[in-house]
Image (cartoon, rainbow, N blue to C red):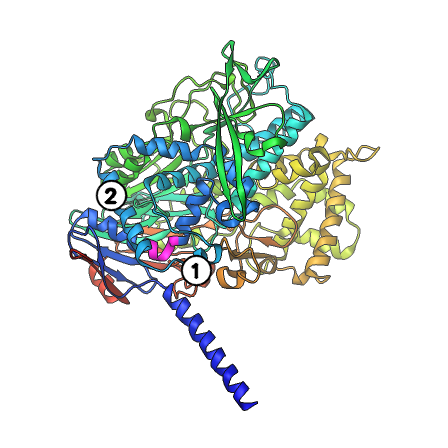
Amino acid sequence: MKRVLTILAVLIIVLVAGGGWYVYSKQPTRQGQVALQHLQGSVTVRYDERGVPHIRAENETDLYRALGYVHAQDRLFQMEAMRRLARGELAEVLGPKLIDTDKLFRSLRIRERADSYVAALDRQSPAWKALQAYLDGINQYQDSHAAPAEFDVLGIPKRPFTAEDSISIAGYMAYSFAAAFRTEPLLTYVRDQLGAEYLTIFDLDWQPKGVLAKRRANPAPALTANDWKDLNALARLSEHALADNGLPQFEGSNAWVIAGSRSKSGKPLLAGDPHIRFSAPSVWYEAHLSAPGFELYGYHQALVPFAFLGHNLDFGWSLTMFQNDDLDLIAEKVNPENPNQVWYRGNWTDLVNTEQQIAVKGQPPVTLPLRQSPHGPIINDALGTAAGKTPVAMWWAFLETPNPILDGFYQLNRADTLAKARAASAKVQAPGLNIVYANAKGDIGWWASALLPKRPAGVKPGFILDGSTPQADKEGFYPFSANPQEENPARGYIVSANFQPVSPTGMEIPGYYNLADRGQQLNRQLSDKNVKWDNESGQKLQLGTTTDYGPRLLAPLLPVLREGVSDPAELKLVEQLAQWTGDYPLDSISATLFNQFLFNLADAAMRDELGNDFFETLLPTRVIDAALPRLAASADSPWWDNRNTSGKETRADTVKVAWQASMAHLNTTLGADSAQWQWGKAHTLTHGHPLGTQKPLERIFNVGPFAAPGTHEVPNNLSAKIGPAPWPVTYGPSTRRLIDFADPAHSLTINPVGQSGVPFDRHYDDQSEAYIEGVYYQAYLNDEEVTANTRSTLKLLPARSGQ
């Protein structure tokens, strides 16, 4: 027996030691010396206490090669997963359940656009040379180190990273901005199947004037019941492809810049927090780059060498999503005599047919037939044989514009004057971005960067267009000077929060803009001339958790609730809602009650008209945010009647049903004692990893859950989809930055999770608790402070011949 126990103990020790060695073999190397091919000189990488690399090189080519190397050792699996998603190659490693996602991304033609884009790039441009050096650094790391644990789990083979992969990820980013897939089928269904009276609750004011009045001039496409099912399936596929992959998706953002006349220091103050879907690791990789003539503290996306956010001692910028509508869905008219022809500009025109093979783990490849009309790719081909009879084409600016985005961001990383920043912004054509800028000289500016298409007058791009008419045609693009923009405005500040901007030409710019509430709240506070702003007051503004949305929606319904609710305890809750200011701290009961009631109100009013599928499509879209307050204020809206009953329900009837459903759900889910319905118990944040959807891997790869303050469309925009409690947060501030150009060396920052994407690394999740608590860290720029806060140093040396 003693011998058996001894053997068992030895086996346990061996297993533990083997597991420890395995984990150790996957960890980043942040100390010592490493020889790299193609370096012209030595490179020093100093890591601070958060794992941020401060890279100093003797030239820019070495600098970007070193960035690629250190970025890869922290984020190689993220790079691999994002390129596979963008290029439709996930099923090869994740199996048949990802075939539909691969079909969708293949139908978007991101692969083909990336290939043609790279083929046309100038091989002598500084941006191309920097990209090649960066990719070489990534590939040298991959070739010389053990694969990440995720590669082992999934059986992912190593293969070189290419410029085509980088551009494909830019395509994924552009697609994640494009709300048309999730919204246009829905709005078209409401208009054409329910009627114009049902459309009035949706805020369509941003579309061209007279859109509803001109319907007869541009008739809606003839779509069958199968086509509607097809379009909704496409919308749902698009939503799930973005939501279920555990990878970053761009959603919204806050940014503002304050002139020196309005700041305590007398210099501009820049703030930014792009809102992106949470993931482990998070989207941004922070790195401080320094070479003769160049320095930048930047925030980098996987496989992109140029910072999308950044600052130095002289200038800085942040981004928000423009939300312009740069993608049109177009229903084609098919020749009844030839299903491979569509009507285009007075003639039957052949579709272009191709095929692609999708590799699938554990089974033979799947053949995907693809078609293209003169308007663009037929995107419902992604549904295969389940697709309806009507081909739906996609016109997408990412496929149709020159889009010198690499050059644009290379130049923006060096834009120390207003003129340089403006010129760089003009080169970002798709996706649409708001670039908010300041420099130490005192300038502030904002440019809505996109190449805006000229659509025929009266066309409503928020709906599916009829390809047999001229409404789907484009008449070129507007010049950049027609884009919304401001430089050094007299008011002394600029705010950008995804709301519809004002056009300098007066033209309306269609888009899927966010609610104005968040921007209005920021503007209201920034416009107070009695306040002199600094980083401390900027923190309070970024971390704000109050919105007028809830009280505004409830105002017309409170008399209805007081009349319809009879239970004394429930009436007390109604009065709590009446006194609620719209704040979302962790201990709020009213926040929980309102969000449950919000879902049940939408459910009771709209599910019967839309059906389960279209209703579920509606919930994560932006259009429902504006629709629900308008519905609440409209006592005579046809939405209040329940089509599934013989009678005609009123607003009071439906509000009562929603309230009763809310009470029942909260009692069942959170308990009968309403004092336990605190927001922090129902609203939580977990940073999900692509492998974290599988038990028990979530314990290794996911980070959280954390009780989360804030909500949808407050400054601290920790957002969850409208639905029943509990509410898992899906997206929010991907970083929080504050830079006072009187002292830019002491700018503030935070990462939602950590720098590293390597499980068990100390920087995998070391910022997650600080983030949810609203803590900020210093982004070191000053060399003395970098030295004082260096925790380890890695030297990259030119490889000797034969190494």
123 left or right of 250? left
362 vs 722, nearest the viewer: 362
48 vs 666, nearest the viewer: 48
Q: Mark 1 or mark 2, which is nearer to you?
A: 1
Majority secondary structure of magenta residues: helix
Rendering quarter of residue 43: bottom left
Q: Tell me the amino acid under the disc marked 2.
A: Ala
Mark 1 / mark 2, whichever is N-terminal: 2
What residue is pinned by disc 2? 130
Is residue 636 visible in this depiction of the protein?
A: no
What residue is pinned by disc 1? 149
566 left or right of 675? right
Q: Which segment is the magenta one?
A: 72-76
**Residue extending furthest bottom?**
2
Measure the C-alpha gap from mark 1 to mark 2. 29 Å
In the image, residue 141 above or below residue 504? below
| Tag 1 secondary structure | helix
In the image, residue 764 above or below residue 105? below
Q: Residue at x 47, y 74 (%)?
A: 15
